[in-house]
Amino acid sequence: MLADEGLLIHVSSSPPPGSAGPRRSAEAQRGKGKQQLKRRSQWPEEGTPAKRKSRLSSPQAKKRATDPSRGIKGAGPPKPPPKKALTEGKVSNVSSGRPLVKTSSLFRNNPEIPDLQRTSVEQVQERVFTSDSFDQLGLHPHLVSTITSVLGMSSMTSVQKQTIPVLMQGKDALVRSQTGSGKTLAYGIPLIQSLQRMEPKIKRSDGPYAVVLVPTRELALQSFQTIQKLLKPFTWIVPGVLMGGEKKKSEKARLRKGINILIATPGRLVDHIKSTKCIHFHQIRWLILDEADRILDQGFEKAVAAILNAVNADNEKRQNVLLSATLTDGVARLANISLHDPACISVVEESGGSSAPEAKACLAEAVGAPPARVEGDGFAVPEQLQQHVTVVPSKLRLVTLAAFILGKCKFEKRNKVIIFFSSCEQVEFHHMLFRKVLAEGQEVEGLEPPLFPPSPVTFQRLHGDMKQEERTIIFQDFLQSKAGVLLCTDVAARGLDLPQVTWIVQYNPPASLAEYIHRIGRTARIGSRGNSLLILAPSEAEYVSVLASQKINVLEMKMETILSCLMKDNRFVGSRGGNKKFHGRDPQEVRRRATVLQTEFENFVHSNMGTVQRAKKALQSFIRSYATYPASLKHIFHVKSLHLGHVAKSFGLRDAPKNLSASTLPKQGKNQRKKRPDHLRKSRNNRCLTEMLQSEYSSGLDSGLSQVKRKKGLRQLGKPKPQH
């Protein structure tokens, strides 16, 4: 038996389940016939066991051993391997022309998918549109005409109906309304109405009369374009935008000429306050903070305080407005600092019977209430939004996402999809991977080329590490496109009005429920229909209960349903498909096609060292972000619950990377320690990060730092230094 095992170890993998005895597959027999013959010729020198000699002494056995085209048992043709072996053995895609590469099974050794405990709750609803028109507000006729003809709006939304009259009275306001409900016009219309009737007329050289702070560059551009459209009849009022990534020299020139409505990101405005002499706030009348909670979440609290101090130094008499889809404790603190006797506006209504006055009273109390009471009402979601969740094992996450994209964007018409990731590195990696594997048309041997035209799927990316020029081009391109896929981070999660977005996919669950609301708010805007999909691992299934606790309903979508979309694409038939046509949802064929698709991903990732390194970098960024979930969600999202090998598979890696914890540390330059006096403290933090990652993965992944520590310990004990 030892000889048998030695013979088979280089011929094929372990026999597939259901096969009788230690039979070798016909495919392995044909591919390795020469190796068998060479090994048998060495047996006389090594000493062959007696039983093996007696078997080889017969002429029939010798003939069988030297004939690689024959099967194992008889002289007839070899039997084909069982179907199940196709998903567990060697898989190749004829279209790629690559040699056979062993791909481990995607459908074995996975954790069980639990039954989701979905409780039916009554969602917090908000009525988007009202029957009232803008004519009833007493606005300038030209402004009403612009709203109707240029913006195409005839009736007000609920937040506009309640907010515009309050702001036209000159009161401060704290506005809470769901994302996509028209908050930009809610403050933009009364702002322009008040500025256009000022006497004497506003001059460009007067400087800013209004400052609008927004958290992201894309939202700054969008708000600027909206204000610009409203100002068409009032050409003497000049809007302008300041944001990071632009040339400061050109921004300073615009500030010298004069800007009356200044839209800016907090960091860039503080930079100009410190370095640009011509900027002043003598004429300031309005200060508006849009998406106030996001401004604070991004760490702009000190910047906002600096802006408030600069504005107060020049003119304290102004109107202040805070707008947000969620009311956090940070927003409550900011409201206490910046607002004076504010009107609290909330258009959230529960279908279960909580009245609007009660919601307003709760909001008013929240301004001075402790943080625990801030989000007690739950989150408002658009009525036309249908939310879905699917539970997918880690190994199958990549092919499931790819199958979903193909199903919605290649085989359905005019779907516009936004996919959210937790890091810039993941966005870059998946953008490169999908463009090379999914977006390129490939011919299949034996089939006519017209059957395989270039894929209509287009991929774009958007994240904070991109240059501003590129971000602007991509944002405008996706804004105007009718279909496509945008891979992005949370930089696109707030305030952006991207029309005709039909699906939101959250590939990495957000760290806060407020961020979940903002992500799904990119679709189903202003009364239109939309869908969202949340992808969870089996260990994260309890997140559905957390959503239910905030009155958010999700419908389950089965992973098998998503993977069945691969049956429509014959690119993934593989070498065994031929011209055979498949119908329905044959589970075995779906699994085989998923394995072929995974093999395509892995072949591309391992085609060169550059793509392997990008995959590892994306994996490391995923682990870092996974370790940053708040304590309230640690029982669901904990690094210890990750299977490193399975997670690596979802990045196209065939094996878990070695020395992962060491490679996650930032590389320091030679002169970096001289410039940073706190380098000792930073190095201790890096060692703590390394030890934390090591403790989370007890699978032999040792960092270089730990190896150095052990070598030092051996030398201290008097043992000789290890020889290499």
Image (tube, rainbow, N blue to C red):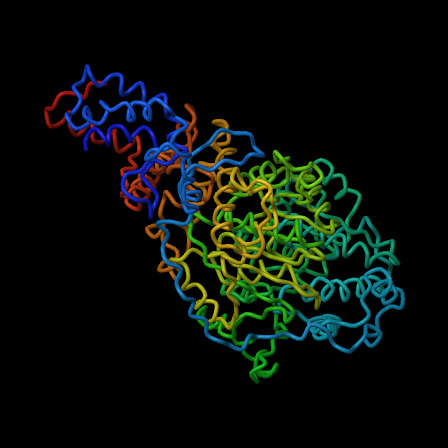
Give the percent coordinates (x, y) of residue 724: 23, 18
Which image quadrant is residue 343 in?
A: bottom right
Give the number of callouts: 0
Which image quadrant is residue 179 in?
A: bottom right
* In the foreground, 697 or 448: 448
* In the foreground, 5 or 208: 5
* In the foreground, 586 or 392: 586
Identity of the residue furthest to the top in this view: 45
Residue 458, compared with residue 585, is above or below; it is: above
* In the foreground, 260 or 299: 299
Query: Does residue 185 appear left or right of residue 16 in this picture?
Result: right
- Which image quadrant: the N terminus? top left
Query: Does residue 188 appear left or right of residue 142 in this picture?
Result: left
Give the percent coordinates (x, y) of residue 644: 36, 44
Which image quadrant is residue 450 in?
A: top right
Identity of the residue furthest to the left in this view: 718
Which residue is found at the position 60% from the left and 78% from the top?
Answer: 349
Which residue is found at the position 47% from the left and 39% from the top?
Answer: 652
Which residue is found at the position 48% from the left and 67% from the top?
Answer: 547
Can the viewer see residue 562 in this picture?
yes
Give the percent coordinates (x, y) of residue 415: 68, 54
Residue 705, compared with residue 134, is above or below; it is: above
Give the percent coordinates (x, y) of residue 270: 61, 46
Query: Does residue 383 appear left or right of residue 552 in this picture?
Result: right
Which residue is found at the position 47% from the left and 41% from the top?
Answer: 651
Residue 66, compared with residue 516, is above or below; it is: above
Can the viewer see residue 170 in this picture?
no
